[in-house]
Image: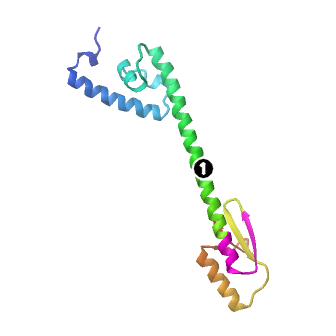
Amino acid sequence: NYTLLEQMPEEKRKEVLKILEERLKDKLERNRNFNDVKCFPLEAFSRVLGPVASYEEAEAKWSKAVEEVEKKKEEERRRLEEERRRRREEKRREILDRVKRLGLPLKVEVKDYAVYVAFARRLPSDEFQRAIKALKELGFKFDWRDKVWYYEL
């Protein structure tokens, strides 16, 4: 009882196995249930998971491989989130330092993903215009609803 794969000439057989191996790897990356891939020949599983003699063994190795893929994805997600948090923190420090160097009478508040500033007292018109220009140059935007300037981190 030969399978179609076993009946193929060696050259064609290798080509088909290579394609099946790539598809199996792709499905592994997308965390497919073993039932979605159990139609693949054992030889393809052996190429991806290491030597397997039965579908039961392939299923056990598949489950472990899926767990590993999930673990790696989670580690990468955490690493990227930490990197984003670190960049936001650096940007926050940089913006706070720049605002401080402006020497303006500002109330500064940091919330979540933004730095908010409001004038601590009324400024003369020309000084006010220079202050607004300086805030805009730093990348601040005005929130009409809350009447504050903000910089998104």
The location of residue 2, given as percent across then percent down, is: 28, 11
The quadrant of the rendering that contains the N terminus is top left
The quadrant of the rendering that contains the C terminus is bottom right
115 within the magenta span: no
107 within the magenta span: yes
The amino acid marked with disc number 1 is: Glu
Q: Is residue 153 visible?
A: no
Q: Residues within 10 Å of mark 1 (few under 14, many from 20)?
A: few
The location of residue 89, given as percent across then percent down, is: 65, 60
Residue 73's place in the image compared with 128, above or below, is: above
Label count reads 1
Q: Is residue 31 visible?
A: yes
Q: Write the residue at 76% across / 80% down.
A: 105
**Quadrant of res 16:** top left
Q: Residue furthest top?
A: 1
**Quadrant of res 85:** bottom right
**Is residue 135 shown left or right of residue 55?**
right
The location of residue 56, given as percent across then percent down, is: 47, 14
Which secondary structure lies at badge 1?
helix
Q: Write the residue at 31% across / 25% down.
A: 17
The location of residue 28, given as percent across then percent down, is: 46, 31
Q: Write the residue at 67% across / 83% down.
A: 131
**Is residue 48 shown left or right of residue 94?**
left
Q: Write the residue at 38% across / 18% down.
A: 42
Residue 10's place in the image compared with 89, above or below, is: above
**Quadrant of res 147:** bottom right
Residue 59's place in the image compared with 30, above or below, is: above
Residue 8's place in the image compared with 139, above or below, is: above
Q: How is the image coloured?
A: rainbow
Q: Which residues are magenta?
A: 96-110
Residue designated by label 1: 81
**Is residue 47 shown left or right of residue 61?**
left
